[in-house]
Amino acid sequence: MSYSEGIFHFFDGIIYHRTKNSCVMKLCIRLLINTSVHECHDSIYSEHLSEDRTLGKVKNCSWWPSCSKETIEYFHTCDRCQKSNRSTGKKFELMIHIQEQKYPWYVVHINWVTALPPSGYRSYEYFLVIVDRYSKTPIFLPCHKDDTAIDTALLLWNRGISHEGLFKNIITYRDPKFPTALWTNLNRLFGRKLSFAKAYHPQTDGLEGRMIQTL
């Protein structure tokens, strides 16, 4: 007896199932689904395996049409697993829309161009790129790889803020120079906001990326 997901065999009053790419026959008894999943997850031989390992163990010994779905549902209703697998780390904030820019230099994007050959009389090997979200105007500031958070703050103040005014919102990646007590206190003092872009979300911080490609 054939089936789109494999072939069935009938031996000694018991139905077995074999997939097209395997020679292993698996027990196919609908009434034993709960017993099968229980033995592969809750028993003393399994000790509450992870979702993937539980599913793999079930598939090694039995089969039914909705095997994967029902096994995963069983795992997510296991009281012990849900209590022991709860998140203990810091909760991530929800992503929010970028604040609407009301005038030039209200919202800026900041990133670095790295791994450049040393150039200039101070042998600069990095570029700090600042792009105004309103006018798309860029500012390129040469800097060094080992610049600290204080060095970056002074560079922004002397070469950026002193010319264009205080930025209301700075959008950047989670570079070690920014998530520091210095920047937290500075932004609190001036009433400014420092926003961090999520990884692999160019729609958030892709503006300066385009400018870096042009550079």
Image: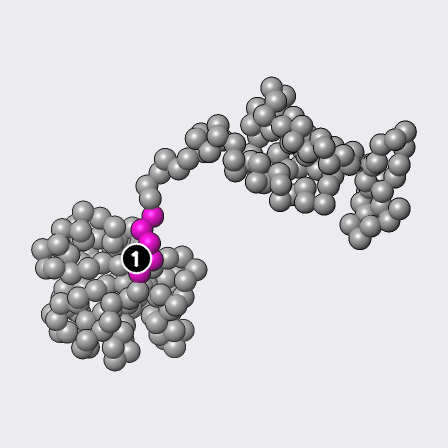
Percent coordinates x, y for residue 108 in the rendering: 24, 69
Return the residue nearer the eye: 182 or 146: 182
- Helix, strand or loop: magenta stretch: loop
Return the residue nearer the eye: 4 or 193: 4
Q: Is residue 186 left or right of residue 29?
A: left
Q: Is residue 143 above or below residue 35?
A: below
Percent coordinates x, y for residue 105 in the rendering: 19, 73
Return the residue nearer the eye: 57 or 1: 1
Q: In which quarter of the image is residue 109?
A: bottom left
Return the residue nearer the eye: 105 or 156: 105
Q: Is residue 70 left or right of residue 97?
A: right
Q: Residue furthest top?
A: 44
Query: Which residue sits at x=25%, y=50%?
Result: 179
Span colored in magenta: 92-96
Label 1: element kind? strand
Question: Label 1: how many residues lie within 10 Å, few (<14), some (14-19) or many (20+)?
Answer: some
Magenta includes 93?
Answer: yes
Query: Which residue sits at x=70%, y=37%?
Result: 59
Percent coordinates x, y for residue 26 in the rendering: 79, 35
Q: Which amino acid does label 1 sit on?
A: Phe
Q: In this view, does 135 lie to the left or right of 159?
A: right
Q: Name the residue under label 1.
A: 196
Query: Which residue sits at x=23%, y=63%?
Result: 170
Res 88 seen here: yes
Q: Is residue 16 above or below residue 201?
A: above
